Image (cartoon, grey):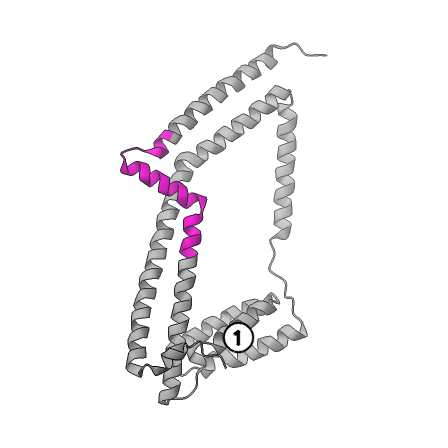
Amino acid sequence: MTTLARSDDRDQTLEGLRAQVTNLEASLDARGADLVRAKSGLEAFRIRYRADVGLLHEQLDELEAALAEAELGELTKRIQEREAEIGQTAASLGDRIEAPPRFTTDAVRKLFREVAKAIHPDRAGDDDARGRRHSLMIEANRAYALGDEEQLRSILLAWERSPDAVEGTGEEAMRLRLLRRVAQIEEYLGQLDAELAALQESSLWQLKAMVDEEAAKGKDLIADMVRRLKRDILVTTNRLEAMKSVYAERPSDA
């Protein structure tokens, strides 16, 4: 059975392992809080950008599209076609919004029984363990409903490597649980680091960083974007109105 323990960890005392777990859990809490703050800050920026800039971008895009259609002399026709497309898309989406079907096979059923037997909350020794098992059962039930054999195997593997899977009350069992907890927290820390790194590589994060950098210099990049967009919207609106006037004055071909 996999223990996720390094060979040199075996020489640590129970007190040393407990101290290591305590320190790692503190790091996990701090790292998790950092990630939450980063996500919250990015979401606040996204909302501001959407309200101040994004809607203006959409307005300009719509005006430019309308101008292109007017220049082709097919504005009405294109609008009608677009409305038809939107209606078809909405109907298509409506058809697809259904409860996920249950796809089960004999292999999935057998694997689910193994998972349920291993992690069932009734086998918990205390309330904390029962809560963890209950959360895993929810994940397992969801994977079973979708016929997701890979996810079920992942749940079972994670359980077999977890501290809660270690039975017994002796010193060696306690040592193994602590070693597994150390490995578990280190894995969680790696996941948090990876998630933060992915967040920082996103275009929205980079835009926020650029806006923050300019703000530190006393410049409001968002305000500059808004001014440019409003100017472009005014220019495009005038061009569109002029184009419509030309078509309105042109005699019909009747």
Q: Is residue 51 above or below residue 145?
A: above
Question: What is the span of residues highlighted in magenta in the rendered image?
Answer: 195-224
Which residue bears the numbered disc 1? 156
The image quarter in which residue 70 lies? top right
Q: Residue at x 64, y 37 (%)?
A: 85
What residue do we see at 43% from left, 58% from top?
194
Q: Identify the main secondary structure in magenta.
A: helix
The quarter of the picture where the C terminus appears is top right
Q: Would residue 153 be counted in the magenta stretch?
A: no
The amino acid marked with disc number 1 is Leu
State the image coordinates of residue 65 (x, y, percent, origin top left): 56, 28
Q: Quadrant of residue 46?
A: top left
Q: Is 199 covered by the magenta stretch?
A: yes
Q: x, y (%) of residue 50? A: 42, 39
> Which is more toward the observer, 58 or 154?
154
The residue at the point 61 percent across, 56 percent down is: 98
Where in the figure is residue 15, as x and y percent of width and height? 28, 81
Residue 224 vertical position relative to residue 169 in the rendered view, above or below: above
Q: Nearer the viewer, residue 8 or 66?
A: 8
